[in-house]
Amino acid sequence: MMKAVFGAMFAVMLLHCAAAQTVHMVGDGVGWEIPPNSSFSYSNWASGKTFMVGDILVFNFMTNQHDVLRVPQASYDACTQDNAIGSVITTGPANITLDSAGTHYYICTFGRHCEFGQKLAVTVVSSTPGGANPRCPPLQPAPLSPPPLHPPRPNRMPVHPPLLRLPTMKAPPQV
C-alpha cells in the first residue's frame, strides 16, 4: 500500500515537473518600456532566470505607446526590424510562448526605444525528457520500505480464526 502511495506521489511530481511552465513578467514591476534609469536593463532582469521551452513571456505595455517584435541577433544588435521573426505585436500586454531552445531576441520598434534600451535577449533551454529540468529537484532513490510491524515467526504454525460452519441446504423433495 505504501509503495503504491509513494509511487503515485512520485508520478505526480514527475508530471508536474515535465509540464511545468513559468510565466515571466518582463521587467517585473517596470514592465515593457524604455528603461527608467541607467541602473535598469532588461539583460540584468533576465540574468539568473531560467527560461524553458513552454514558458511564457508577458510584455506589459500600453497599446499605441510600445510594441514587441522578435528579431535575429543582428537586428537586435542594430535595433532594426530587418528579418523579423513573426509580426509586430502592437496590443499590450503581449503574451509570447517560448517555442524553441536557443537565444530569443525582442525589441520595441517605436521610435528609438530599442536604442534607449528597450530590448531583451533570453536564452531558452529545452525541457525534453532527456534533459534535466532545472526547476525540478534531482531524483533521489526511493526510501527503503519500513520493516513489517510484526515480522513472521519461524517454526510456528499460523493462527487462523475458527472456520464458520454454514448451514447446509437440503434439496427439495422430488415429486
Image (tube, rainbow, N blue to C red):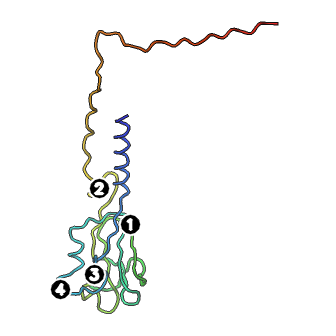
Indicate the amino acid at tag 3. Answer: Val
Residue pointed to by mark 4? 38
Name the residue that disc number 1 marks. 99
Gap in Å between the C-alphas at discs 4 and 3? 13 Å
What is the spatial separation of the Cα atoms under label 1 and label 4, in whole angstroms?
31 Å
If you read the primary sequence from the N terminus, does the residue marked by circle 4 or circle 2 appear first?
A: 4
Residue type at mark 1: give it: Asp
Secondary structure at numbered mark 3: loop
**Tag 4 secondary structure:** loop
* Disc 2 target residue: 133
Can the viewer see residue 107? yes
Quick one: quadrant of the N terminus?
A: top left
Residue at position x 34%, y 87% in the image: 109
Count of numbered tags: 4
Q: Residue at x 38, y 37 (%)?
A: 4
Label 2: element kind? loop
Amino acid carrying mark 2 in the image: Asn
Q: Earlier in the sequence, mark 1 or mark 3?
A: 3
